[in-house]
Image (spheres, helix red, strand yellow):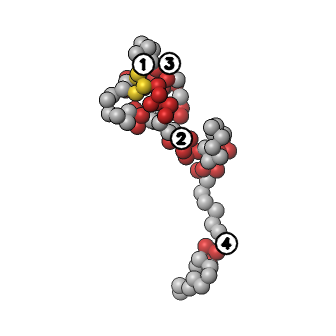
């Protein structure tokens, strides 16, 4: 994707080039260029782009498999299941309020 965005082969991309990545990949559709431009120079090299951790993978790749499946997304977005003790005042001496 980076090479596609660096269509002028300058060795870096800018915010305008980054829009290509956003259009091509749903993973980056809502990404901000500034997240990758950690130096604030208005440009991102390929090395910087690759080294910047992906928020998408941080949220959904809990198994560190370097891939995200539909099941991974479902598990990450599913509401938490209540534990048996949380239904009765927290268990272990939790007083019930009346």
Mark 3 neighbour class, 10 Å CA radius: few under 14, some 14 to 19, many 20 or more: few
Q: Badge 1: how crowded within 10 Å, few (<14), some, or many (20+)?
A: some
Q: Is residue 76 above or below residue 25?
A: below
Q: Which residue is mark 4?
A: 84
Q: Nearer the viewer, residue 56 or 49?
A: 49
Do tag 1 and tag 3 residues touch (Cβ < 8 Å)?
no
Residue 67 coordinates in the image, percent (x, y): 64, 37
Mark nearest the camera among 1 and 3 is 1
Q: Earlier in the sequence, mark 1 or mark 4?
A: 1
- The span from disc 2 to disc 3 (Cα, nearest Å) is 20 Å
Callout 3: helix, strand or loop?
A: helix
Distance between mark 2 and mark 4 Cα atoms: 31 Å
- Other residues around mark 4 within 10 Å, as few (<14) / some (14–19) / many (≥20): few
Residue 20 place in picture, x, y as percent: 46, 22
Q: Earlier in the sequence, mark 2 or mark 3?
A: 3
Q: Which residue is mark 3?
A: 4
Residue at the outermost top position? 8
Q: Earlier in the sequence, mark 2 or mark 1?
A: 1
Q: Secondary structure at mark 2?
A: helix
Q: Position of residue 37 (x, y in %)?
A: 38, 33
Q: Residue furthest left?
A: 41
Q: CA distance from mark 1 to mark 4?
A: 56 Å
* Residue 84 placement: quadrant: bottom right
Give the camera-side residue of 95 and 36. 36
The residue at 34%/34% (across/down) is 39
Q: Residue at x 65, y 40 (%)?
A: 65
- Name the residue beneath numbered marker 2: 56
* Residue 11, label in figure: 1
Q: Is residue 96 above or below residue 33?
A: below
């Amino acid at each position: 994707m980076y090479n596609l965005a660096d269509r002028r082969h300058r060795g870096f991309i800018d915010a305008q080039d980054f829009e290509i990545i956003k259009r091509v990949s749903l993973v980056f559709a809502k990404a901000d260029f500034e997240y990758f431009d950690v130096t604030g120079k208005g440009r991102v090299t390929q090395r910087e782009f690759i080294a910047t951790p992906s928020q998408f993978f941080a949220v959904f790749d809990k198994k560190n498999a370097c891939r995200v499946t539909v099941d991974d997304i479902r598990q990450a977005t599913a509401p938490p299941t209540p534990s048996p003790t949380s239904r009765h005042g927290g268990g272990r001496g939790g007083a019930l309020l009346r």
